[in-house]
Amino acid sequence: MPNQTIPLDRVFWALGDPTRFAIVERLAQQSSSVSDLAKPFTMALPTFLQHLKILEKHELVTTEKIGRVRTCTLNGTKIDEVRSWLEMQEKQWAIRLDALDKLLEDDR
Amino acid sequence: MPNQTIPLDRVFWALGDPTRFAIVERLAQQSSSVSDLAKPFTMALPTFLQHLKILEKHELVTTEKIGRVRTCTLNGTKIDEVRSWLEMQEKQWAIRLDALDKLLEDDR
């Protein structure tokens, strides 16, 4: 299907993992080759690559292979989308929980 | 293990389902027997009971059987806990995303 994007709650979930968030933080400073990006992480490389794959699948990171080097770049637009989604979620939950509180108060 | 409580992110998840939230809303108005509570829901009773069981397991609802009637009551304290947890999450995410934005801006 064309233009099928992953729902933002899933993207938010992908961003919620501490390792993946640390990768995103490093890429926010600068784009990086996969090998440079992996260096500070103590986990096994396949595990690291799996995290990277999840970030890529959720459109938070794009990678491009030039010659033998694969470079990872953060998708800042997707981060902005997550932020907007999160703000909307926060507003909706505030409304829901306030309404619930009101019902509970009326009942007391 | 004594006093083992379910983590609040799981309680929040339990509350996130539309059917379960609707049950919680009804119980916020008044405690109710299982059969009265189930009436407005068009789903099959076993499905409804499963939702109720999830709410009970996550300590959002308590049930008490007196004679042949099982009465469900909302645990308002747990709702308050979810609200506090949510507010803390919101703050933490705001800090994280602001820091990320700052890194991205420095990079531009």
Image (cartoon, coloured by chain):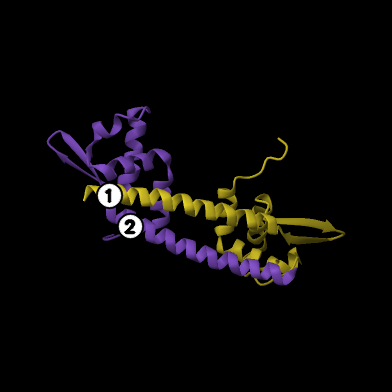
Chain colours: A purple, B yellow
Label disc, if present, on residue A80 of the rendered structure: 2
Along the horizontal axis of the image, is B65 left or right of A71?
right
The quadrant where residue B2 appears: top right
Q: Amino acid at mark 2?
A: Asp
Q: Residue furthest left?
A: A67
Chain where mark 1 sits: B
Q: Are marks 2 and 1 on the same chain?
A: no
Say which chain tag 2 marks.
A
Q: Residue at x 57, y 54 (%)?
A: B12
Q: Is residue A66 left or right of residue A38?
A: left
Image coordinates of residue B93 in percent, x first then y, are 44, 51
Q: Position of residue A68 (x, y in %)?
A: 15, 33
- Residue A51 or residue B84, whichever sits in front: B84
> Which numbered disc covers residue B104?
1
Q: Secondary structure at mark 2?
A: helix
Q: Quadrant of the N terminus of chain A?
A: bottom left
